Structures are given as C-alpha cells and as structure tokens.
Image (cartoon, rainbow, N blue to C red):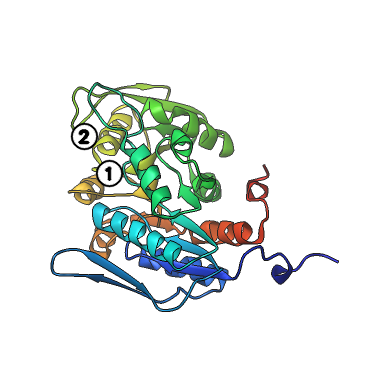
Amino acid sequence: MPLHHHDMKVYGGIKLYAGTGSPELAQRVADYIGEPLCGRDIIEFPNENLFVKLHSSVRGQDVYVIQTTSSPVHRNLMELLIMLQTLKLDSAARITAVIPYLAYGRSDKKDQPRVPITARLMADMIEVAGADRYMLLDPHAGQVQGFFSIPGDVLTAFHMVTKHLTEIRPTMTDPVVVTVDLGFAKKGRNIAADIDAPIAFVEKRRIANDAKAQALTIIGEVSGRDVVLVDDEIDTGGSIMQAVNLVKEHGARDVYVVCIHPIFSANAIDRLASLPVKQFITTDSVPIPAEKIALLKDRLNVISVAPLLGEVIVRAHEGRSVGEMFNE
C-alpha cells in the first residue's frame, strides 16, 4: 500500500502564516498547498512598536511563516522575528521561517577591516526568535547556510528561469549567457549548460565602498549574438545598466535580463525602463509595485516561485526528500 498524504504526518497540520512583506506570494503559496493563510493581527503602535496576535492556537502544529525581508527591510525583519517568537510561545511543534529574500545577504564576510558580518547576525536572530528550520531562496552567498545551526532548505529558482529560457531559446539567435560579474560565473555557467549556450563574463572592478561599480571589459564573444544577462538580484540597476551598454557596444543583438530577486531600489526601474532590453525575466520573491510594473509593461516576465516554495513546504511537512525534486 502506498503511503497517502494523511498517513505520514509527523507533526500536526500545516499552519501557514504570513507577514506583510509579500502578501501576494504568501497567498499563492497557500493556494498551491490548498491550506488557508491563518489569521493574525500585526499592529503598529504610534511609537512604531509592532504587536502580533494569533487568531487561533498553533499548539502542536507544523507552522510555516512566509516573510520576505525586502523593503521596508527593518519593519519586515522585526515582523518575522516577532511572529516567530509569538508562535514559539504558543507551543507550536515546529516552526519554519520561509524567507524568499534574505536581507543583508551581501554582508557575508569581513572583506575589509572593522566591518560586521550581518548575514551571520540575521541567522542568529532568526534562531533566537524561535525558528526550528529555515527556507531560503537563492541567497547571495552559499555560505549563509553555515551561519545557521538549525537545519534548512536552501532553494534555487534558477531551474524555473532556465525552463522559461529553454522555451524561448528557439526564437533566439546564437544566444550567449553573460554574467554581470565574475562572482556569478559558476552559476552562470550552469545556466549556459542547461540552455546549451556558450558563456561570457563582464569583468567589473569596484573602486570604492558605495554601490557604484566600474564595469570595464567583457571576457568572451557576444558580437552578433542574442545575450542573456544573468545575476541573482537587481538592486539599483547600475551593474545591469553598465552590462547592457557594454554588450551592446560589443555588437550584441537582442538582450534578455534575468534575475531572481527584483529589489529595484531607488530609481532602478527608471534605469531599466530606458535600457534596450527585449525582456526582463524575474520572480515574485520580492513584490514589485504596480507603478514599477507599468514602466516595464510587456517587457517584464515574472515567474512565480510559489509552486517551488509550496512543494517544499508539503515535502518538509510529510518528511519526504526535497532533493528528489531536482533529481538529487
């Protein structure tokens, strides 16, 4: 007899909670799983202090808190921490922090004197607040896994993006995958292999501590080819702008821009809208405001990560392998 959905329960039922960081994504995850988002109040008092109250008990239940930590970063982070503690104090059997985008992911090492490793602090806070497990999507640096002492699932949405690229590949002319910097070279190579395309790299030299970087050269051949520019996140859009201009100067045909996390801070969206890019391909790990979507119009293609997160939540709940989803 095969095991059925209800025979494998290790904990109580799945209870899904969401902060205010990514309500649409949380709802899509809930729809995928077929469980409602549980009721909770999140109140901000006049003194900016946050207060959380659950509508019903989670005693003995398997709880998942879906909260992205993009803008407003500190509000979203405190919501996550306070919700984790609330659930812990209400005797949840197991609490998993589902964080589609982890803030401070770039502060992952001391690359100069007298600086913090804030990504490590994030992991510590999430644990102390009450998380038993965590779930991350494409963290900027793989080593953040080592900052957590609790088990977790570190997922990637690149296979979903690659699937889309494979579908549109027949319409492309001699595509080449280009990584926006050398730090992303390894992941870029995997994407190139998956869509059966060569790879090239933008060599970018940072000159100071600010977000501005100096893109200098391109390593590889882009002339007369369609270019798929890949990066893990687009923040201010500066690196992407330089990369698009650089490949165009080197004779690229159509340019496709791919990223997992559409942070789009400051005036990034205006920069992107002005670029000669045929298609922007990203995910809903971070919500994009409607007015920003309007600026990119039909050039923007948002792939939902809800089926990925939902499937992993179901597998984690039932005690089944997550690696099997990726043939691992």
**In what element is the residue under mark 1?**
loop
**Extreme-right residue of the structure:** 1
Q: Pinpoint residue 279: horizontal percent, then vertical percent.
A: 37, 49
Q: Is residue 222 among what the camera can see?
A: no
Residue at x 43% of width, y 49% of height: 127
Q: Pinpoint residue 69: horizontal percent, then vertical percent.
A: 33, 53
User: Are the residues flagged by discs 2 and 1 in contact, CB closer than 8 Å?
Assistant: yes
- Rounded to the nearest angstrom, the CA distance separating label 2 from label 1 is 9 Å
User: Which quadrant of the rendered structure holds the C terminus?
Assistant: top right
**In what element is the residue under mark 2?**
loop
Q: N-terminal of the two: label 2 or label 1?
A: 2
Q: Pinpoint residue 300: horizontal percent, then vertical percent.
A: 35, 55
Residue at x 35% of width, y 65% of height: 19
Q: Is residue 255 above or below residue 13?
A: above
**Residue 196 falls in image quadrant:** top right
Instruction: Say which of 171 and 196 sits in front.
Output: 196
| Residue ID for mark 2 | 211
The kind of residue on which mark 2 rests is Ala
Instruction: Say which of 144 and 189 sits in front.
Output: 144
| Residue ID for mark 1 | 235
**Residue 115 falls in image quadrant:** top left
**Extreme-left residue of the structure:** 46
Q: Is residue 238 among what the camera can see?
A: yes
